[in-house]
Amino acid sequence: MYAIIKTGGKQYRVSEGDIVRVEKLAGDVGATVKFDQILMVGGESAQVGRPLVEGAIVEAKIERQARARKVLIFKKKKRTGYHKKQGHRQYFTELKITGIQA
């Protein structure tokens, strides 16, 4: 069984036991998170929501709160001597999917 959940403005296809990196969520490591914005539940027979599936819940456990690898942004304009270097590290939450209830 799998589900498509919506969190952080993005959509993720998850199955039980998957480890997924999502945008940072509030909570400590080991805490349980429940997602109620389920767009689709698949398996033997698929349920597609309009826009959400009624009564469907995906439970996950927070495995890790961290920051991703650094992304470098380099801007340059030729012949003017202008160059600018920036870096950015995005926060993320790593989740382990523990259950899908349709």
Image (cartoon, rainbow, N blue to C red):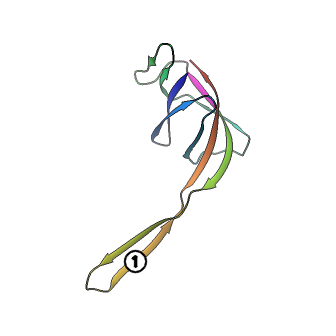
As rendered, which of 83 and 43 lies closer to the eye?
Answer: 43
Q: Is residue 56 magenta?
A: yes
Quadrant in the picture for the C terminus: top right
Q: Image point 69% across, 43% down: which residue? A: 63
Quadrant in the picture for the N terminus: top right
- 7 left or right of 77? right
**Amino acid, disc 1:** Lys
Image x and y of residue 33, in percent: 65, 35
As rendered, which of 60 and 20 lies closer to the eye?
Answer: 20
Q: Quadrant of residue 51?
A: top left
Q: Is residue 92 above or below residue 87?
A: above
Q: Which residues are magenta?
A: 55-59
Image x and y of residue 77, in percent: 29, 78
The residue that label 1 is drawn on is: 84
**Dot 1 surroundings within 10 Å: few (below 14), some, or many (20 or more)?**
few
Q: Image point 27% across, 85% down: which residue? A: 80
Q: Is residue 23 above or below residue 55?
A: below
Q: Quadrant of residue 67?
A: bottom right
Is most of the magenta stretch helix, strand or loop?
strand
Give the residue at the far right of this rendering.
Answer: 30
Give the residue at the far top of this rendering.
Answer: 45
Q: Secondary structure at mark 1?
A: strand
Query: What is the tally of numbered marks visible in this picture?
Result: 1
Image x and y of residue 20, in percent: 57, 41
Q: Is residue 23 magenta?
A: no
Q: Is residue 84 above or below residue 30?
A: below
Q: Quadrant of residue 48?
A: top left
Image x and y of residue 88, in percent: 50, 64
Q: Image point 33% across, 77% down: which residue? A: 76
Q: Image point 54% across, 32% down: which residue? A: 14
